[in-house]
Image (tube, helix red, strand yellow):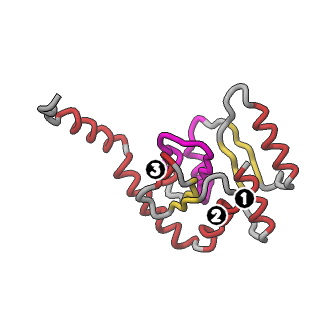
Amino acid sequence: DLLLDAVALLRDRGIDVEAEMVGDVFPGYEWYETELRDRSAELGLSDRISFAGFQSSVWPALARADVAVVPSRSDESFGNVVIEAALSGRPVVVADHSGLREASSGLEAAIRIRPDDPAALADGLARVMDEWPIFRQAAMRDAQFAQEQYSPVTYQRRMADAMTEPASAER
């Protein structure tokens, strides 16, 4: 719903944007998807918002995107979507809290916004559009950074190093 409101704000500012919402609701929360679709129609965004639903792989959706948006309201242990966006070379506009802050740390093309604030989300997206060449180059650097920091090979090496370190003498 935050993304819907942000897209409406951008449209009202004369900025032409489209958004694809990727993901599905948990069983028992189908009412929320219905509310999102109704809200999209109410705001007159039916031609600007698409609902992709569950996708077994996020990579094709990221390949279609110019910018990734992670506007979570609730705390997250770690923002995997942020890392996936970085690995895809996409700027990301992300809520500034908990695991999302941690995941976006070190990313040049990440804009952290106040959580639960559609105007801040719209402002973040507008900034990426206004400074597109800068954000695009930064996102390419972020892809390299994310690959170095979060690749399976890096994870395996760090785990192996941790497992071979001598145990502390103090127990």
Q: Report the front residue among 43 and 23.
A: 43
Per the model, the C-alpha gap separating discs 3 and 1 is 23 Å
SS class, disc 1: helix
Choose top left, top right, bottom left or bottom right for residue 25. Answer: top right
For the residue marked with disc 1, what is the amino acid? Ala
Magenta stretch: includes residue 59: yes
Q: Which residue is mark 2?
A: 125
For the residue marked with disc 2, what is the amino acid? Leu
Side (left or right) of 108 relative to 10? left
Choose top left, top right, bottom left or bottom right for residue 18. Answer: bottom right
Disc 1 vs disc 2: Cβ atoms closer than 8 Å?
A: yes
Labels 3 and 1: the sequence-earlier one: 1
Residue 133 in the image: above or below residue 55 = below
Q: Which residue is mark 1?
A: 6
Q: Residues within 10 Å of mark 3 (few under 14, many from 20)?
A: many
Residue 168 in the image: above or below residue 51 = above
State the image coordinates of residue 161 (x, y, percent, origin top left).
Answer: 21, 39
For the residue marked with disc 3, what is the amino acid? Ala
Choose top left, top right, bottom left or bottom right for residue 157. Answer: top left
Q: Which residue is mark 3?
A: 103
The span shown in magenta is: 56-83
Q: Report the front residue among 28 and 149.
A: 28
Residue 42 — which label? Answer: none
Side (left or right) of 149 relative to 13? left
x 75%, y 66%: residue: 16
Residue farthest to the front, as pictured: 170
